[in-house]
């Protein structure tokens, strides 16, 4: 971890660049918007830490009533537990002897859950001797991990209930593709299809005499649709920060509107008559979901990136040395490029939070 690019109390324009900026007012407003949207509903919130990779962010979500966090990798879960988070679901399959040994060690320190979609993987988890919550991951339209509802999935649930150390905790049903469908109509149709898979699986489990304690899943683009369809737990992540890609989604009831809270601060390092070059390129902002946008600078566009440079074009281009805020195209992989959040309120640095799980891909 390198030294932070800022000091407490500095003005935003004094922060070294590129820097990952978290607007605390917007971040806290997003947490409140989630709370308000769920008021009066019996649903558990388990935010996804793969997005923010920081126990400091997780602790603030837990303080709002979250039951724990999700992670995608064992190393992320390790970072969360080391940072004081005591309930973690690895909402992914964990395969391989080394990873399972680490997961078993983690289960001695915290309440740990994991997903399965294969009987041989289940046997390996049981042989580790770890006490784990096990969720069967359903294929509900993502076409990634997961098992189709049916007799094979019922047999997998029976195998979980027959183990000595593992507890059948329920179903994971996450439709990631639906998160970025632009219209509410498209997202509604996708989640209706996922709900049919969940209902069929719950019916089959009940017929087999197996209780399904929890259906978990749902993301920032659809979570209210899953809540209305009967999910017990939501795994929202990007709602806390937002990015360019999520902002392209049509926003309509029952989904609330969240604010941009995450930015990349960049400096103009070169200036010509038709362009300005900033010091934030591919290594400062992920472009897998599109280029970043320039915050509150109408007429100025970020039009291209190379390793260490970003190209701006448009009217009223910024001057040499001027600092600008960029909205990342995709917050999750952008966060993974930085060691620190520079937390700002009222134009000054209020806190510096380490991104503990940066690079945690094992």
Image (cartoon, rainbow, N blue to C red):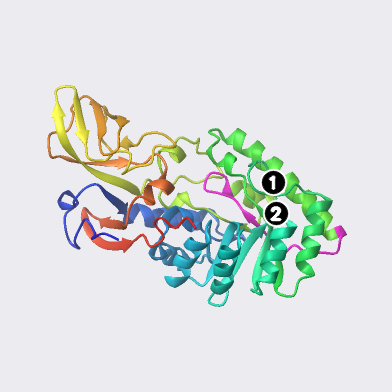
Residue in front for this viewpoint, 76 or 49: 76
In the image, the segment drawn in magenta is 207-223
In this view, 55 is above or below 285: below
Q: Disc 2 on helix, strand or loop?
A: loop
Q: Tell whether position 152 is magenta.
A: no
The residue that mark 2 highlights is 117
Residue in front for this viewpoint, 74 or 69: 74
Label 1 to label 2, Cα distance in Å?
A: 9 Å
Residue 214 seen in render: no
Say which quarter of the image contains residue 133: bottom right
The residue that mark 1 highlights is 139
In this view, 209 is above or below 359: below
Query: From this viewpoint, which residue is outermost toward the right?
Result: 207
- Residues at circles 1 and 2 in contact by the CB criterion of under 8 Å: yes
Q: Residue at x 41, y 55 (%)?
A: 359
Sequence-wise, the earlier of marks 1 and 2 is: 2
Q: Main secondary structure of the magenta part?
A: loop
């Amino acid at each position: 971890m390198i030294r932070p690019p800022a000091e407490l109390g500095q003005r935003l324009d004094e922060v070294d660049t590129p820097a990952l900026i978290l607007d605390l007012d917007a971040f806290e407003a997003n947490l409140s918007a989630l709370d308000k949207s769920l008021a009066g509903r019996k649903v558990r919130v388990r935010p996804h830490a793969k997005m923010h990779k920081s126990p400091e962010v997780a602790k603030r979500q837990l303080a709002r009533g979250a039951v724990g966090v999700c992670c995608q990798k064992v190393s992320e879960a390790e970072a969360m537990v080391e940072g004081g988070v005591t309930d973690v679901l690895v909402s992914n399959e964990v395969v391989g002897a080394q990873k399972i040994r680490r997961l078993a060690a983690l289960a001695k320190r915290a309440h740990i859950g994991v997903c399965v979609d294969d009987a041989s993987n289940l046997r390996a988890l049981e042989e580790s001797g770890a006490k784990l919550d096990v969720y069967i991951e359903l294929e509900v339209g993502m076409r990634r991990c997961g098992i189709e509802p049916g007799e094979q999935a019922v047999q997998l649930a029976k195998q979980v209930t027959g183990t000595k150390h593992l507890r059948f905790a329920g179903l994971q049903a996450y439709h990631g593709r639906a998160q970025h469908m632009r219209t509410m109509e498209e997202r509604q149709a996708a989640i209706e299809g996922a709900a049919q898979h969940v209902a069929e699986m719950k019916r089959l489990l009940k017929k087999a005499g197996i209780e399904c304690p929890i259906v978990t899943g749902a993301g920032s683009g659809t979570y209210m649709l899953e809540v209305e369809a009967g999910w017990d737990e939501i795994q929202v992540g990007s709602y806390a920060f937002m990015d360019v890609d999520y902002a392209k989604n049509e926003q309509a009831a029952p989904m609330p509107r969240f604010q941009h809270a995450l930015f990349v601060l960049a400096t103009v390092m070169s200036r010509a008559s038709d362009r300005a070059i900033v010091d934030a390129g591919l290594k400062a902002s992920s472009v897998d979901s599109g280029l970043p946008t320039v915050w509150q600078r109408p007429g100025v566009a970020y039009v291209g990136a190379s390793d260490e440079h970003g190209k701006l074009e448009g009217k009223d281009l910024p001057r040499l040395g001027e600092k600008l805020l960029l909205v990342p195209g995709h917050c999750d992989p952008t966060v993974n490029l930085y060691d620190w959040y520079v937390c700002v309120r009222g134009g000054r640095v209020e806190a510096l939070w380490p991104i503990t799980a940066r690079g945690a891909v094992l």
